[in-house]
Each structure stands twice: as C-alpha cells, then as structure tokens.
Image: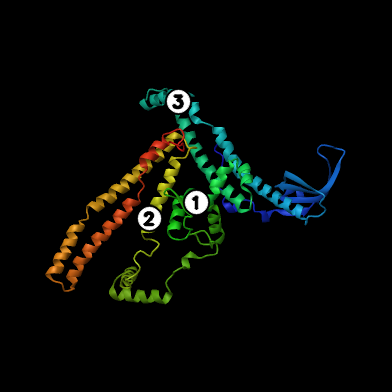
Amino acid sequence: MQTDFSAPLLSDFLDPAEIEVRAAGAGWEDGTAIVWLKDTWTGASNPATVRSGVSLRGYLEGDDIGRTAIEGATDLDEPGVQAALTGMRLHLIAAHGQQYLAPVQDEIDRIGDPQLQIAKDERLREAIRQRVADGTADPETVTLVATADAQEKELAALRRRYAVLLWRYLAHLYRHGMAVEGIARWAQQPAATVQRRISSVPTAGAAAITGVEPKTWSAYVARGQAPAPDDYVGREPVWRLATVLRHIDTRPGRPGRPSKDAHPQDEGAYPQDLLEAAERAARQQRIPRAEWLRRAAERALPYATFDREDSIAPALAELGGWLDETREEALDAEAPRNEREFRAAGYGECLTVVRDVLSTALDGIDRHAAAEAYKAAASADPTQTAELGAVWGRAMGTELAAGILHGLLRALPHNADDVRFRASLDDPEQNLD
C-alpha cells in the first residue's frame, strides 16, 4: 500500500509564534513548547565542577528534541538567554518541518533503483526489455519489468513531491531568519546550493512555495498578480526568495481564489432593476435576455481590446509555463532517464507544432498584395470614403497580424535538440564545454 503523504502548504509549517515558552511545571512535556528553568550541571571535562545557569528544553508534540544551557544566567529576559531562545525556536520549527520531508525521503530510499530488480547490468536490462517488447519473454519476466516500470512512476512522483516540499521547507526556515549554514544542515544540501536557491528561485520553485502550478504562477506574473522576475538565467525568469515571500505576506489572499467569507456569486451581479428592464426590452424584441445583454455590450464599444484578463497574455503565460516546467523536468538529474527523454520529446514536439501553426498562418498573409491594393485604391480615389477605409484596414490588418506572428515565432525557444540530447545523458546538468 502506498504511503499517504498529505500536502503541507507553507502555512502548515510550525510558526515560531505558535511555540509556547513557559517555566518548568507539570504537563509541559506533552505539547510543543520551550521550557526554561534555573539549573545546575556538572562540567563536561570535570564532573566535580558544578555549573549553574538557565537551561532551555525544547519539546515537539511531547518529544524532547533538544536542550541548551546558558551558564551564569539567572532569568529568561537576559540577552544571552533570549539569543538561545531564538535558536531553540528555529531548532523546533526545523525539526517539525522534517516530519514532512523524512517520510517521503524514506519511501524514496525504500524503493531505491527499480531497474536493478530487472538486472544490474544495463545491457542485460536492455536485452530483457527487448524480449518483453518482442513478446518472447516468460510471464515472470513480463511481470518483473511491469513492476519495475510502475515503481519508476511512483519514484518519479515521490521525487517531484520531495522537490516541492524542499522548496517550502527552505522558504520557511529562511523566512524566520535561519542562516544559510543552518538551512543547509537541516535540509542536507550544500551551503552553495541553498544560497543559489535563495537568490535565484525559478518558476517551478516559486509555484511550489506559493502552492500553485507553475503555469498558474506564470499566468499570475503575466497579469500582474505576482511580482515580475528579479532576473533571468538565460531565458528562464527567476526571483529572489525574499521577493516570493514578500508576495505571500502582502497579497490579500491566494490569487484567483476568494476568501472563506466571500460570496463570489454576488460579485459583479447585475442590479435587479437592470435585469427587469433588460427582460422587458428582450420581450419586446422577442429575443432571449442573454442575447439582448450581448447586443447591449456590443453597442458599448469601443473598449480596450487587449486590456482584459481573458486576452492573449494568459494564453502565452500558459504556453511559457508549460514549456518551462517540461524543460525543467526533462533536465532533472534526479528523474529516471526514460522519464527525462519522455519530457524532452514532448517539449520538442510542442515547440514544433506551435512553430508550424504560426509559420503556416504567417505564410498565408500576403502583406504586399494588401499594401498594393490600398495604394491603387487611394490613387484612384483619394477621398476618405468607407470603401477606401475598408481597403486601408485590410492592409493594416495583414501588416499587424504578420508582426504578431513574427514576434511569437521569435519568442519561441530554439533549444529542443539540446534539451533532447541532455535528457539522454546520465547527468543532464554536466558541463559539456
């Protein structure tokens, strides 16, 4: 049975404000708290030496997870004790966050490398897989390969889940002031890697931290509902971790999702008197009320054509978000090679289809003919008639449409072959210079 891992959001991690600080007394061992008391203890190197001060003990849901002593202190309010208290709080929230990461990592370790169940030698595995594909393998071998493939999918899902949880864990510890070295120790990551994550959060990381899909984050950025990138790494937008956390702290609620007390059905509703008037007018014209409202809206033109949330920007953001996410998964060194190659093939084919559609549309636009038709019509009759305006509009329309298509074609990445090649390597991140 597959382990059920609930999906903690950033807000589910333990907040330092939730940690009670209390003097030693009955019952404090049962909860999450930091307990302080005046204490004495023997010297580490000389048991005959007795030292005294304030002792702090950290308890996480009743488990004793850490102790520290401040020699010479007599009260909780002393600066040395307060500094130790801050460190103990960070220790508690880090240990609490490990409760989310550790089970996923344990499950990843338990599965190991499913391909080794087929055979340790790669060439032998390929030969066995070929027999299964040819239909010449015995039932036990077919079952073995199918089981390994199923575990590969499970492992890939677990790794993606761990990657999301790790982003949230790092963000939470950084948010509450833990130093890079401390984050690296708790997250079991090199300090340089942690520093890079803090200064350069990609789309997938920002989406993981905020609890949305990467394409949704990209759409929010395109609509101005999330911060613009702080920088770019190649064509990849990146944000500082502080920028992402500031967005979380200052937004009124999750973008696109109303608060629990909101009543979306009332938002933007038509006043009752307007609906009644529309109903009467629609009956007089013998058309449905919805049709009457549509015609009324058309008569209210002109309006800002592209200044709408349902215009081209979200569609482009969705395309860009999907490409970014798929490319990142294709180059994920932790993913199995067959999954990386699957993602890389999809990435390249998507680019090919979009480029072919745009190129076909562009080839169908005859800008020269439209421009020449306008020149001829204007020379024949320079008067600004409606007929001449229509010819002018066709010339402008073809020119502007071609410009839009050209711009979209230029914006498409040209790295499909490189992504496909790197995805086939044992280490897609290796330096090939």
Which residue does the numbered mark 1 point to in the structure image? 207
Q: Residue 109 at what x, y percent from top left?
A: 57, 34
Secondary structure, mark 3, is helix
Image vertical order of residue 225 relative to residue 131, above or below: below
Q: Residue 17 at what x, y percent from top left?
A: 67, 56
Q: Residue 362 at what x, y percent from top left?
A: 25, 53
Task: Tell me which amino acid carries mark 3.
Answer: Glu
Task: Tell me which amino acid carries mark 2.
Answer: Ala
User: Are the residues tagged 1 and 2 within 8 Å (C-beta)?
Assistant: no
Front one among 78 and 337: 78
Q: Between marks 1 and 3, how big is the CA–CA gap?
A: 36 Å
Tell me what residue is drawn at x 64 percent, y 53 percent: 15
Q: Residue 430 at what x, y percent from top left?
A: 46, 36
Which residue does the numbered mark 3 point to in the structure image? 122
The residue most toward the left is 380
Front one among 334 and 129: 334
User: Upstream in the sequence, badge 3 or badge 2?
Assistant: 3
- Rendered image quadrant of residue 63: top right
Image vertical order of residue 276 relative to residue 355, above or below: below
Secondary structure, mark 2, is helix
Image vertical order of residue 221 relative to residue 61, above or below: below
The residue most toward the right is 48
Secondary structure, mark 1, is helix
User: Are the residues tagged 1 and 3 within 8 Å (C-beta)?
Assistant: no
Q: Between marks 1 and 2, how big is the CA–CA gap?
A: 18 Å
- Rendered image quadrant of residue 394: bottom left
Front one among 150 and 271: 150
